[in-house]
Image: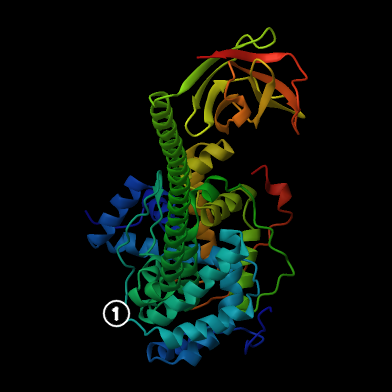
Amino acid sequence: MEQKLHAVGEWGLSDETIRGLIRRIEAGDSSALLTLYDGTSRLVFGLLLRILGDRTSAEEALLEVYTQVWKQPTRCDPERMPLAWLVKISHDGAVSRMNWSKRDGAKLEIARVNADSPTTVAPRLQNLTRASLQSMAYWQRVLLESAYYGCLSCSELAARIGKPIGAVKEHIRLGLSRLGESFGPADGREVELEIATGGDLEARKSD
Amino acid sequence: MRHERATEELRELAALYALGSLTQQEARSFELHRKQGCSVCETEFRKFEHAVAGIGLAADEAASPEYIRDLLAARMEREPQTAGHTIRSNPVREPKPAPEYVRPTAPSPFLSLSTQPRSYSTRILPWILVAALTVLALLGLLAYRAAREDNTRLQAEVSAARADTDDLRGKLDNSKEGLANLEQIVSLAGKPGARMARLVGGATALASSATLIWDTELNQCLLLGHFAPAPEGKNYQLWFFTQATKVSAGSFKVNADGRTLATIPVPRDAASAGAVVITLEPDNGSQIPTSPYYAVGRID
């Protein structure tokens, strides 16, 4: 049975709502964790599925992520964006599960994000980051996503695309800088930024 | 050394560290630098760490199965929260044991969960029980098979011993019989008035021979010899020849080896017999010899 959407509003969960839930979780309120799960698990599960590649591993990892939130909610820094923390522990968990054979077989390819794919957790933030990634030069996005989802090092990336490692590092730094600027400061205060949509991505492969 | 301001090189280092794409050596070096309290590097790292999370935020959403939520609720009831310690700054991270690079991640929540004693023991207990039962079942099966093999082996040994016993008993019986026969022969041969005849095979039975010891007191004789097995429907018949007549003493049998040891009554009218003859006659015997002499001997 697929998950139902529990109590997720049109605009998803705000940072303040998530912080409030985490405070309740700290106090031992299990219903707060379930509310957090209902509001965020679609994003976390999608991320885990993208990294791990199979549903069974992703489901196990999903359970472990929220168990970790339940057991150690104080690891969430209240001065920082709580959803970024949740994404980070999900990514860390998935990477620790990812076996080396899968990592070695990771392909250099852009995630096929469906433009119509729903964003229910934090729609504004999710759409902002998606737009930022889509506006990047082809190789910049390939390198960022391959490093993030495929756990590839700079030297591995350089070897696979046949470019100098210095160029790879430069692409990554610029890409991350642009992404960071696009969705606000690290303290979670979201800001409106103009995102250059960039046109046809395929046309940028020559960049 | 603490930096005064962020340079491009420093930003690059922080970006790659946040993304986990530095080599192991580079990551350790940067980590050590952060530990030493370089606020410039810490700030740069925080910015990029935030940006890295943005990549994850862009992922497609996916609905998870409903049972995961149920499992989570059950796990919360079963497992207590860990006594908390708020981590206000990014924790010092142990690099992953990667061959080429280190992911600058906090100690994995997955690894830490997997080492929670209660969770681990709860998960592993059924498997331990299954493994123990499997081992016991295997041991039982092996013991049963070993016992069955022992039993089969012992039964074979008992059967062999019984066969040996029967064989020995048969040999013993034969020995006893042979001894008794020998005693009878010795006793008869040494008896006063005993007469003997040595028979030799005729033209058709050159390999045959026999000895007859006649106990004139008891009017019986002991015939021992070796003959070819009698043909189907035929039997050997013993004759006492006197000057006037041929007196039948009856038929006798030979065993499968052609041996014979028979005590045969001697008719009274054969008292004056000077020779003994053996012929092959029909099973029911003949009044007079009807076939060539098979063996013949003179009575001394």
Horizontal side of B105 relative to B279 (left or right) equals left
Q: In the figure, B158 relative to A70: above or below?
A: above
Mark 1 Cα-neighbour bin, 10 Å: few <14, some 14–19, many ≥20: few
Residue B17 location (% of width, % of height): 40, 55
Residue B76 location (% of width, % of height): 45, 85
Q: Quadrant of residue B288?
A: top right
Residue A37 location (% of width, % of height): 54, 82
* Residue at the image position 54 percent from the left and 53 percent from the top: A150
Identify the residue position indicated by label 1 in the image. B85
- Label 1 element class: loop
| Outermost top residue | B203
Camera-side residue: A97 or A38? A97
Q: In the figure, B183 relative to A156: above or below?
A: above
Q: Quadrant of residue B277?
A: top right
Residue A128 location (% of width, % of height): 61, 70
Residue A152 visible here: yes
Residue B48 visible here: no
Q: In the figure, A201 relative to A71: above or below?
A: above
Horizontal side of B295 relative to A73 (left or right) equals right
* Residue at the image position 50 percent from the left and 51 percent from the top: A172
Horizontal side of A181 relative to B112 (left or right) equals right
Horizontal side of B195 relative to A120 (left or right) equals left
Camera-side residue: A174 or B30? B30
* Chain containing the residue with disc 1: B
Q: What scheme was used to colour the molecule?
A: rainbow
* Quarter placement of the N terminus of chain A: bottom right
* Residue at the image position 54 percent from the left and 25 percent from the top: B223
* Quarter placement of the C terminus of chain A: top right
Give the amino acid at mark 1. Answer: His
